[in-house]
Image: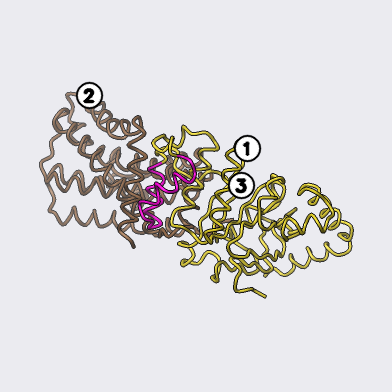
Chain colours: A yellow, B brown
Amino acid sequence: MESPTAAVSVTGLSVTRGKSLVLSSLDLEVPRGEVVGLLGPSGCGKSTLMRSIVGTQIITGGDVRVLGDTAGSAALRHRVGYMTQNASIYDDLPVIANLNYFAKVIGADPDQVKRVIERTDLGSVARSMAADLSGGQRSRVSLAVALLGKPELLVLDEPTVGLDPVLRVELWALFAELAAEGTTLLVSSHVMDEATRCDRLILMRAGEIIAQDTPARLLQRTNTTNAEDAFLALIHEAEKPASGIRAPGKHRAVSEEP
Amino acid sequence: MNPARILATTQRVLGQIRHDHRTLALLLLVPALLIGLVSWIFTDTPVFAQIGPAMIALFPFIVMFLVTSIATLRERRSGTLERLLALPLGKGEFILGYALAFGLLAVLQTAIAVGFAVWVCGLEVSGNLGLLFVVAIADALLGTSLGLLASAFARSEFQVVQFMPALIFPQILLGGIFLPRNQLPPALETIGDWLPLSHAIDALNAVSRNDQDAGYIWWRIGFIAAWIMVSIALGSVTLRRRTN
C-alpha cells in the first residue's frame, strides 16, 4: 500500500506513554514536494507523530517509512531536517556560531550558513547571542538550523507560533518556495487559518487522524467555507458513529501491543 | 568517528564557556584561591605540604563533574541533544568532543592552580611536573565521564547537583586526605582502594614527594583511565536516539 512517490508513509503507528495511548493505529501518507499541514489542538499528538517520523520517538507498533527507509535509520540523518517545538539552539552562543556548529555536524557547505540566514531573515541579529533574541527570532534560528544541508524532507513543529502576521506570511511563502524546489514539508500548527496555505492537510484530534485531504476537497466535503468549521464538521461526523465503531478500534490498538 | 565533528563539538563547548565570562573566571581562579586559603590556614605547620598535592586532585575532578553533568542535562532538556542525535553526529563524537573541551580547560585550570600552589604558597613538588599534569588531566576527564553518567539519571538541575555529594564526597572521605587509607577500618580501606580519586591522590602525592618510580604513577593513571572508559561506555548507552 506504500506508494513509491510518498515522502512519508505511516501504517498502523501506535505510541504509548506510561499507560496511555498517545497515538492509536495511525495511517498517513505525505506525498513528495508538497507542503502538508498537520493541524489539531494542542496535545492531540502532533509532536509525537513528528518525532516518530524523525525517528526520535520510541514507538509501540506500526511501520514508519521515510524517503524509502525506516524512520530514524542512519542514512536518513542527512536527508531529514527537524525543527522541534521549542527552539533547540544554544542560548549561550551567537546565532552565527549556532549555525556554524550545526553546519559542521551536518557537513553542510559553509556558504549555506549565509544562505539560511538570508532565507530566515536573521541578518540583523546574526551576531547577537541567541538568549537575547525574541521568541519568534529564536524559533527562526531553529528553523534555519533545520534548513542546513538542504534536506529532502523538513519536519517543522509549529514554526509559526508567536510570529507577527507579516513574518508568518513570509514564512509560508518560504515553505512554498522550498516545496517548489522539490523539498517535502510537514508543518504542524494549531492555528486553523494556516490551513489554506497548505497543499494538503492532516487533521488530528486526541491521537487519531480524522481527515487527510486537500483543503479544497475538505471544504467541499464538509460544505464549509473555512478550516475551523470544516474541522468541527469532521469531529461531529466522526463522533456520530463513534460509540459503535471507534471504541473497538481503540481497543484493538491496545491489545495488539506485544 | 569523524574528527571534524569531534573538533566542532569541542569548539562549540569552549565557545559557550568563553561567552560566559563569570563561569570562565570561576573555573580558572577558584581552585587556585582555595589552595591559597588552605595554605594560609595551615601557615607554620607541615600540613599543607602533606595535603597540598591532594587538593590539586580535587578541583579538576569536582569542577568538571559539575560542569559536565549540568551541561549535558541542559543539552537533554533544551532539545539540542535530541536535535544532534537526529543529525549525523555519533554518540562517541559527542562525548569525545566534550571530553576534549573539558580536558583542555583542566590543563589551564591545573596550570593556574599548580603555579599558584608552587610559586605563591610554596608547595614543594620534587617530582616531574609533566606527570603532575597528566594526573590532573586524567582526573578532570574522570570528573567529565562521571558527570556525563550522572546527568542521565537526573531529571532536573536540583537532582544533578545532589549527585555531587552522593558520588564525589565518599571518594574524598575515603581517598586518604583526612586519614591515610591504611588507617581506615578494613572494609572502608578496601572500598577506598577501588575508588578512582584515591589513585589520583596517591599519584599526586608520589609526584610531589618523588618517592616512587614512574611505573607506580602510570599504574594509577591506568586505573583512573579504566574508570573513565567504563563510565564513558555506560554514559554513551544512556544517550538514546529514541526517547519517549
Which residue lies most toward the bottom here?
A: A1
Percent across and percent down for residue A35 are 61, 56
Q: Mark 1 points at which residue?
A: A165
Marks 3 and 1, how far apart at CA: 14 Å
Quadrant in which the C terminus of chain B is drawn: bottom right
Q: Which amino acid does label 3 sit on?
A: Glu
Percent across and percent down for residue A109 are 36, 55
Give the number of the mark in front: 2 or 1: 1
Decide if residue B96 is on the left or right side of residue B236. Answer: left
Rendered residue at 23%/39% (across/down): B110
Q: Give B235 or B199, whichever is nearer the viewer.
A: B235
- Our reading of the magenta stretch's main secondary structure is helix
Q: Which amino acid does label 2 sit on?
A: Trp
Give the number of the mark in front: 3 or 2: 3
Quadrant in which the N terminus of chain B is drawn: bottom left
Do tags 2 and 1 sit on the same chain? no
User: Can the viewer see residue B192 in this picture?
Assistant: no
Q: Residue B40's image quarter?
A: top left
Is residue B41 within the magenta segment? no
Q: Give B41 or A106, whichever is nearer the viewer.
A: A106
Label 3: which secondary element: loop
Q: Name the residue under label 2.
A: B40
Q: Which chain carries label 2?
A: B
Percent across and percent down for residue A194 are 68, 47
User: Can the viewer see residue A258 in this picture?
Assistant: yes
Q: Which amino acid does label 1 sit on?
A: Pro
Q: Mark 3 points at which residue?
A: A158
Residue neighbourhood size for the residue with mark 3, other residues' Cα within 10 Å, grouped as few (<14), some (14–19), many (≥20):
many
Q: Which span of residues is magenta-colored? A: A96-122
CB atoms of marks 3 and 1 within 8 Å: no
Do tags 3 and 2 sit on the same chain? no
Q: Give B92 or B188, whichever is nearer the viewer.
A: B92
